[in-house]
Image (tube, rainbow, N blue to C red):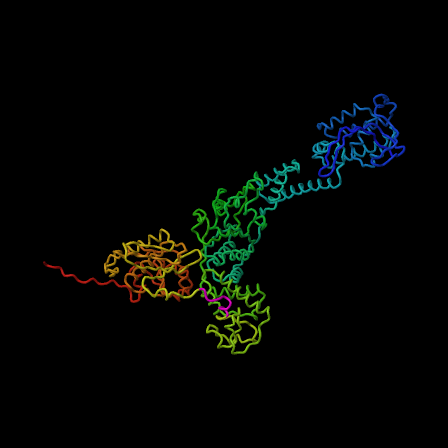
């Protein structure tokens, strides 16, 4: 029932959004409530004054009267203030108050400043006698002094900072013992920094990197945690500690086991397997061999990415894939400088941190689809990464120290080398990955694709059977690609259709002579021999219970996948003169290309359509010029019987499909053959395809992509292929079974091409003997 009387000096506040006020008062004296007169609307009481402020100025008591208590209190108060930072204005003002104010006022002032509970402050307020007040306040001062001593002892390196932080806001923090939670948090942060420094010193990083890290850790210790740079520096140091400077995995160098593993994972791809086994053999002889930098170039879907993962598995190394398609900022490769907000290391360093070793297999996927922008050229940034003579000291902008990439096995993949800068292409070992032949696709489907699809759809071989003849039908009639992605999707569609039947439980027993062909179901049960197409010959082996397995044949394919998407139309397209078949190379593999020509009355113009490039247009002009110069030799005439083929005649050349851009010199022989057929009126053999560049003298020059082109001719069912004689060496890369199915005609001049393209040859017509007139 003892309180403090005060005068209201200032009232600050508002009623919105809710009433809140701040009251500034000046204390006058203590009072005691004698009687409560009323409580509403506000308390009114009869009080008795217990002391006065004026007594300190009017009635000065000597130090002798205050005795030892006053002296002891003053000594503790001075000791407490001097433990704080005197450079802070609030602390210096408090020190002056201790000397200027009378000793009687000091207990009340210091009690309001030091950290005490509300209960302790009420006890001081209730102590009316001065002597009692001194006795109760001295233990509080001693407790505060001991707390500051303990704090300074545990945090000696930051003693000045502690004083400064405590003394900035004296009304709240002066002589304040930190709470247990705050103290534990500060100690934990301090322990983390010490642990980080220990990790840095025990790590196996290079001398240069260690020097940089020790310098940064010193800065980190002196840096307040509230600074933004504190987190950046700490993240940098943690990354440096986590990087695998000398940590590596041991390679599995057993060549026999590696060959078995590669053969199990991938069918064909002999070049790739040979190169990996060569690397293993050299590693057995020399341990510190630098990692090769390979580039697999081939059409989509042939397994370039998956074979990279298989190589890592064979070597026993970690695998990391970096997708470069569409990347247009060189900082993705080299990282950002740490001066930028949100800076981070590049993908190379991030990948090393992820795998945790310095000799992984890095797959740089789609390196031919890198972009370029105002932020730099990532292809130029890759020059340092993919150069064996430079990447032992690769410097990321974020790290700003050299890192050794010489033990990393880099594998790049691309669909074409045309869009790769020459300097980058020069640093990589190019390995061509051609498309698959039909036989290889059948083997891949039955070894890998069908088991994978059965597992994904929860089916078993006892529920569905896909014969090799059916697989061949899918390859030839429903897909036309160099890889096997479309084939995989078609097999997935078949498995989904069968899964529907199995799930619905609609597999009922059928009569042996019934074939469910015309009911429009997704898949059929074909048990009787007369209901099965000729392609299924092993019916005796498949004669199991009537419900299972569901046999997929041509009729089931038609129900599930619809009518065939591709038909053999070569013979139909060559039923009239002026049509020839060429061979073209695309990033998706080889393709057959029809060239069509027609003539009409006109002014001798040559029209070219089909999205042709400049080189192809020049080939067409070369072809017509050569034919015009040799028209008499081959007895080629226009509609009016003139040897000048363009006399009152317009020629139109078209290259389907019209929406596909085409370019290159290899269509020269095809254009000559097509025009020769048009002007001679003879049909080109329907089973012949050709490729080769021509000259004005009638020579046939070599071209590229022979293997892909030959495979395209084989897929289309053609029997003869005309190629330049100087490309004969490229036939060694083609599988033996494909070479056996095809007849190759080596041509060094256009005469040989025309003789091979037409039935009975295209012989030169003998000139009629002329008699010299004597008149």
**Whole-percent x, y for residue 354 in the image:** 59, 50
Please say whether residue 204 is one of the residues in the magenta stretch: no
User: Could you say which quadrant of the image residue 72 lies in?
Assistant: top right
The answer to whether residue 111 is above or below residue 634 is: above
**Whole-percent x, y for residue 692 in the image:** 35, 57
Q: Quadrant location of the C terminus?
A: bottom left
Residue 628 visible within the image: no
Residue 665 placement, left or right of 183: left
The answer to whether residue 472 is above or below residue 405 is: below
What secondary structure is the stretch in magenta mostly built from? helix
- In this rendered view, identify the residue nearer to me: 536 or 643: 643
The answer to whether residue 646 is above or below residue 96 is: below
Q: Quadrant location of the N terminus?
A: top right
Q: Residue furthest right?
A: 34
State which region is magenta: 556-565
The residue that appears at 60% across and 42% down in the rendered structure is 236
Residue 338 placement, left or right of 293: right
């Amino acid at each position: 029932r003892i309180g403090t009387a005060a005068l209201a000096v200032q009232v600050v506040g508002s009623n919105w959004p809710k009433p809140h006020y701040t009251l500034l008062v000046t204390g006058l004296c203590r009072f005691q409530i004698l009687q409560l007169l009323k409580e509403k609307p506000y308390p009114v009481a009869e009080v008795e004054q217990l002391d006065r402020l004026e007594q300190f100025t009017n009635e000065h008591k000597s130090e002798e009267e205050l005795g030892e208590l006053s002296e002891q209190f003053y000594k503790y108060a001075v000791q407490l203030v001097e433990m704080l930072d005197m450079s802070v204005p609030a602390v210096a003002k408090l020190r002056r108050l201790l000397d200027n104010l009378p000793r009687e006022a000091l207990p009340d002032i210091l009690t309001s400043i030091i950290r005490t509970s509300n209960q302790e402050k009420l006890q001081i307020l209730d102590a009316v006698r001065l002597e009692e007040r001194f006795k109760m306040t001295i233990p509080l001062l001693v407790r505060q002094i001991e707390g500051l001593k303990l704090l300074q002892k545990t945090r000696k390196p930051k003693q000045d900072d502690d004083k400064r932080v405590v003394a900035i806001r004296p009304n709240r923090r002066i002589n304040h013992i930190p709470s247990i939670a705050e103290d534990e948090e500060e100690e934990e942060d301090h322990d983390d920094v010490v642990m980080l420094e220990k990790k840095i010193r025990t790590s196996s990083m290079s001398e240069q990197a260690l020097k940089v890290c020790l310098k940064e850790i010193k800065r980190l210790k002196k840096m307040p945690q509230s600074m933004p740079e504190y987190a950046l520096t700490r993240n940098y140091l943690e990354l440096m500690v986590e990087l695998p400077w000398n940590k590596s995995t041991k390679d599995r160098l057993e060549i026999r086991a590696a060959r078995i593993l590669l053969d199990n994972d991938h069918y064909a791809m002999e070049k790739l397997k040979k190169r990996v086994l060569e690397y293993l053999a050299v590693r057995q002889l020399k341990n510190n061999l630098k990692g090769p930098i390979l580039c697999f170039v081939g059409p989509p879907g042939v397994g370039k990415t998956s074979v990279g993962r298989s190589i890592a598995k064979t070597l026993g190394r970690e695998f990391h894939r970096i997708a470069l398609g569409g990347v247009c900022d060189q900082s993705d490769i080299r990282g950002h400088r740490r001066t930028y907000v949100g800076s981070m290391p590049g993908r190379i360093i991030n990948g090393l941190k992820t795998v945790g070793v310095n000799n992984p297999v890095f797959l740089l996927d789609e390196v031919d689809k890198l972009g370029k922008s105002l932020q730099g050229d990532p292809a130029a940034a890759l020059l340092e990464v993919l150069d064996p003579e430079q990447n032992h000291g690769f410097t990321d902008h974020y790290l700003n120290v050299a890192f050794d990439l010489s033990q990393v096995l880099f594998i790049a993949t691309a669909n074409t080398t045309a869009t790769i800068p020459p300097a980058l292409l020069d640093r990589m070992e190019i390995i061509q990955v051609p498309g698959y032949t039909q036989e290889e696709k059948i083997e891949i489907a039955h070894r890998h694709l069908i088991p994978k699809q059965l597992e994904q759809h929860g089916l078993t071989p006892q529920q569905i059977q896909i014969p090799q003849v059916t697989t061949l039908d899918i390859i030839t009639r429903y897909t036309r690609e160099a890889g096997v992605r479309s084939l995989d999707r078609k097999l997935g569609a078949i498995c989904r259709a069968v899964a529907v039947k199995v799930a619905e439980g609609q597999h009922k027993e059928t009569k042996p002579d019934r074939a469910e062909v015309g009911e429009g179901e997704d898949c059929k049960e074909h048990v009787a021999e007369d209901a099965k197409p000729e392609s299924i010959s092993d019916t005796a082996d498949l004669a199991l219970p009537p419900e299972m397995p569901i046999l997929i044949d041509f009729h089931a394919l038609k129900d599930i996948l619809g009518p065939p998407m591709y038909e053999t139309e070569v013979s139909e397209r060559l039923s009239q003169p002026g049509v020839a078949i060429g061979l073209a190379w695309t990033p998706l593999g080889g393709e057959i290309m029809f060239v069509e020509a027609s003539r009409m009355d006109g002014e001798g113009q040559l029209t070219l359509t089909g999205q042709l490039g400049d080189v192809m247009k020049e080939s067409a002009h070369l072809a017509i010029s050569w034919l015009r110069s040799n028209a008499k030799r081959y007895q080629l005439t226009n509609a009016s019987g003139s040897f000048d083929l363009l006399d009152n005649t317009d020629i139109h050349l078209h290259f389907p499909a019209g929406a596909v851009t085409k370019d290159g010199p290899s269509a020269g022989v095809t254009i000559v053959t097509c025009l020769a057929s048009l002007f001679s009126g003879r049909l080109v053999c329907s089973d012949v395809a050709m490729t080769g560049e021509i000259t004005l003298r009638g020579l046939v020059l070599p071209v590229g992509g022979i293997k892909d082109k030959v495979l395209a001719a084989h897929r289309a069912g053609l029997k003869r292929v005309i190629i330049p004689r100087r490309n004969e060496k490229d036939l060694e890369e083609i599988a033996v079974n494909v070479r056996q199915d095809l007849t190759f005609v080596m041509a060094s001049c256009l005469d040989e091409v025309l003789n091979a393209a037409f039935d009975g040859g295209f012989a030169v017509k003998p000139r009629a003997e002329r008699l010299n007139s004597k008149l």
